[in-house]
Amino acid sequence: MSLNIEFHYDFGSPNTYFCHRLIPGIEERTGAQINYCPVLLGGIFKATNNRSPMEQFAEVKNKNEYQALEMKRFIARHHFSDYRSNPHFPINTINLMRGAVYASHQDYYKRYIEAMYRCMWEQGKNMADPEVIAESLSEHGLPADEIVAAMQNPAIKQELISNTSRSVERGAFGSPTFFVGDEMLFGKDRLLELEEEIVSQMR
Amino acid sequence: MSLNIEFHYDFGSPNTYFCHRLIPGIEERTGAQINYCPVLLGGIFKATNNRSPMEQFAEVKNKNEYQALEMKRFIARHHFSDYRSNPHFPINTINLMRGAVYASHQDYYKRYIEAMYRCMWEQGKNMADPEVIAESLSEHGLPADEIVAAMQNPAIKQELISNTSRSVERGAFGSPTFFVGDEMLFGKDRLLELEEEIVSQMR
């Protein structure tokens, strides 16, 4: 049986963008394939009573300043020259994630992911706005009408809910979350351990 | 001017114990000396409105279970075979940290630190109890009467308060916290970056 590796992501989190940019290197070095599983971060937060670090630590002196510094250091370390913070942050990503569920069954899933991450974390677009989503899909050569229609499809909506619930059942409380078999790793700061875990389980 | 590197520690945090065990390797590889600065973690929390992760995330599903797993992985990775969780945790460390301030002016400071970490995180002693402290000091060949008396010395008490305030003024919100010159790094998960920062600033 081959090893199942999942990346539970929501476009709304910049940390998942950083992971997305670093995953190709991990796949190349390990020879493993990492499967992108769309989840709704807001749904995970609701189910686990969690919040974003920015909210969680809003009243804590020094903490968010340090988190910002860590992000800056991470960006510098990995030379993410295309990254820019999104002026519309935080963005409601429910439509984007429903679109991701739909796209995951199509042959253009990878192109959809790449396009949405660019819009969110390189181009600073307001990806909560359905018109902006439709325009962006077209610009990236994706079938906008088909994908936008699918965002209202009850089966697609239900699949996103199921993905999100299953993620929490498996131990998630946020995103980016990775599963290597049953081993869970959380956060952009666990990519080294992720790679080691993949190598270890592939042996 | 030589590079000033400080480790702001409180014996009460197991993560500072892990750092203490890994610091000799960092010093050996870099040739740098890391200065131990005693602070009161409870005082830092009060000044910054912060709490321990265990408290902070008590109501968050999956989070503390994952933190426990990360600690277990960290212990396995670094082969900390002597570590055991302290049954008296959380322990009020105010006397231990006052003792550390006093010891920092004596030639046995390193031995004091090593002894207290062993009692806390290898031998599971109740180090909030003044009798246990006195006994432990004697067992480790340290001048118990002198150190215990110093814990009531107003100048020593004040120095611990000052260390703690200065730590917060420089950006700390918890412990373990490191300063390499003015660059702050927080947590046992930043030891690789700490070492790189030391090497970079020593150039």
Image (cartoon, coloured by chain):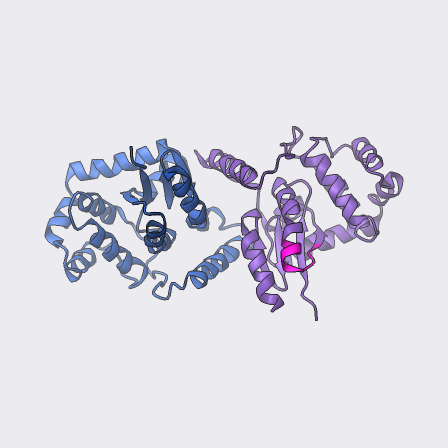
Chain colours: A blue, B purple
Q: Residue furthest front?
A: A203
Queried whether the magenta region covers residue A65, the answer comes back as: no
Residue B52 shows in the view: yes
Is the residue A170 above or below the residue B1 in the image? above
Quadrant of residue A2 in the image?
top left
**Closer-to-camera residue (B129/B190):** B190
**What residue is drawn where x is 64% and y is 35%?**
B83
User: Where residue A121 appears, x then y in whole percent?
Assistant: 32, 59
Residue A51 shows in the view: no
**What residue is drawn where x is 57% and y is 52%?**
B191
Q: Is residue B8 left or right of residue A193?
A: right
Magenta span: B26-35
**Closer-to-camera residue (B114/B94):** B114
Q: Quadrant of the N terminus of chain B?
A: bottom right
Q: Is residue A190 left or right of residue A138?
A: right
**Closer-to-camera residue (B121/A24):** A24
Q: How many marks?
A: 0
**What residue is drawn where x is 15% and y is 46%?**
A106
User: Where residue A187 appears, x then y in whole percent?
Assistant: 42, 47
Is the residue B65 above or below the residue B146 in the image? above
